Image (tube, helix red, strand yellow):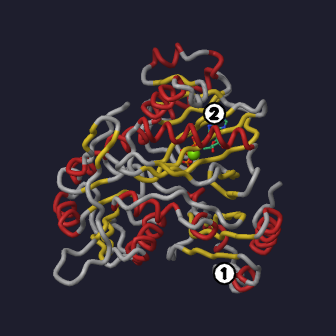
Amino acid sequence: MRNGRAWGQSCPVFIGNSVSAPPPILPNPLAGDPPAALGVLGGGQLGRMFVHAAQTLGYATVVLDPDPACPAGQASERHIRAGYDDPAALNELAALTQAITTEFENVPAQTLAALARTRRVAPGAEAVAIAQDRRLEKAHFSRCAAQGGVAPAPYAVIETEADLAAAPANLLPGILKTARLGYDGKGQARVGTRAELSAAWAGMNRAPCVLEQMLPLALECSVIVARGRDGQTVSLPVQRNLHRGGILAVTEVYEANVPLALAARAQQASLTIADELAYVGVLCVEFFVLTDGTLVVNEMAPRPHNSGHYSIDACDLSQFELQVRALAGLPLTQPRQHSAAVMLNLLGELWLNADNRGRPRPPPWPQVLALPGAHLHLYGKTDARPGRKMGHLSFTGASAHEARARALQAAELLGLESWP
Ligand code: ATP
Ligand code: MG
């Protein structure tokens, strides 16, 4: 087992096979007791929905994000406006909270490690550092695959000219991905030949990269797991995802959205990936299903994930409540999906349609909300830009047919492309 125990004070004590976790941080204490406050690094929409879930359970929240208008800062009781490496701000965050999480994976791993000296931090710095770097991430997946898990795409690490020259021919055509800081398809180039590979790597300033074989995808899916400090794990149902332009567009979750045997394998592989990191918190693992039915693991996000947003409306326990519970050390119970769900991402383009005076026009929410089972979530962003995630719309239904039919109607009202 990998020693991912970078959470300092909260480091569990292994006694034989069992793990003793520290006592839970109980919400809503009475006057005179220390306030129960949870901190979150990052103020985007994931932080905002974490704050909502924490507040529902009776916790106070403190968000650290330099942006004064950030979505989570608007929702939280406290918002510290500072950078993620500002020592005074990190001290203030630690002083105001009992436990701290992160809503984005590019938070400096040293920040998590520093906070973990005095506070419970989940996920831990080591797990986040692995998820931040595709080289470490793929090596972790390969180790898990060797234990009967699911393998990543064939790949090679490119760090030097010699690596480039030695890249196996079977990786072309392929995708060159920067090892660090890629998201929503950024930091990636599709390459067909060695000449294109060289040019693409030069275009990435010869930063460390991985070259992955281009695979024939039949579909994409993801699994969200939550793991407690005591090693207990639960998972959400497998999500089927459709991307457009490298950005998640649609997530569909209902029985047999993915062939059942593959769904079971993806869930088992995700639990192994979390266990082998001694992970604490919510983790999302993305998979490909190839045209020949092979399951391939793509990447992981050490936090709640866009493909899990449907769980707020369609499950009895959302990915955000799971994150709150795992962080606070409260019990994790197996979530139950009570409704079929289809989620549509709402990107900035939707707002950029002009009215007849040339001004941006809000999308037709009254018509959309007239559809039964519609749940609109807007993130409080006032600056619409193409590709910017402004909100999402989940449809719940008694059947997959019902949820899909309404989501397709909404897509038509919003001018979004249909999907099969
Ligand atoms: P995210 O927004 O999920 O963080 P990302 O920028 O980190 O995305 P990936 O998930 O690696 O990037 O890739 C984005 C998309 O590109 C995938 O969802 C998939 O559609 C496509 N893709 C990535 N790798 C491959 C591959 N090896 N073969 C075929 N398609 C791929
Ligand atoms: Mg991805």
Question: Where residue 55 sits: x, y (%)?
Answer: 40, 76
SS category of the residue bearing label 2: strand
Q: Is residue 402 left or right of residue 384?
A: right
In which quadrant of the rendered view does residue 170 lie?
Answer: top right
Question: Where residue 340 sits: x, y (%)?
Answer: 72, 64
Front position in the image: 103 or 412: 103
Residue located beneath label 1 in the image: 361
Mark 2 vs mark 1: give the one in front. Answer: 2
Kind of residue at disc 1: Arg
Q: Is residue 22 left or right of residue 261?
A: left
In which quadrant of the rendered view does residue 212 lie?
Answer: top right
Label 1 Cα neighbours within 10 Å, binned few <14 / some 14-19 / many ≥20: some
Q: Residue at x 41, y 60 (%)?
A: 331
Q: Residue at x 20, y 84 (%)?
A: 31
Quarter of the image with the N terminus is top left
SS category of the residue bearing label 1: loop
Residue located beneath label 2 in the image: 296
Is the residue 416 above or below the residue 246 in the image? below
